[in-house]
Image (tube, helix red, strand yellow):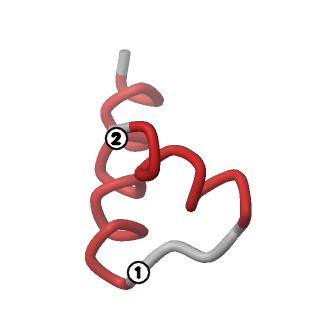
Amino acid sequence: MDGFSSQYSNGRAVPLQSLFGDMQRKRNAEG
């Protein structure tokens, strides 16, 4: 998962990964 988060910090997320991150953000927003 190390390369996973590093891609996010680089702002180069693959569509699938950015979609996954979007779901995570929504979950966090909902609490």
- Percent position (x, y) of residue 12? 61, 76
Q: Nearer the viewer, mark 2 or mark 1?
A: 1
What is the x, y in percent for residue 22? 40, 57
Residue type at mark 2?
Gln
Q: Secondary structure at mark 1?
A: loop
Q: Give the farthest residue toward the front.
A: 3
* Image quadrant containing the C terminus: top left
| Among numbered discs 2 and 1, the one appearing first in the sequence | 1
Question: Within the image, what quadrant is residue 14 found in?
Answer: bottom left
**Which residue is label 2 attached to?**
24
| Crowdedness near tag 2: few (<14), some (14–19) or many (≥20) residues, C-alpha within 10 Å | few
Residue at 51 percent across and 73 percent down: it is: 13
Residue hosting label 1: 14
Residue at the image position 33 percent from the left and 38 percent from the top: 1
Residue sitting at the far right: 10
From this view, report whether residue 8 is shown above or below residue 24: below
* Residue 11 rendering spot, x and y as whole percentages: 70, 69
For mark 2, give the secondary structure. Answer: helix
Amino acid type shown at disc 1 = Val
Q: Is residue 8 above or below residue 12?
A: above
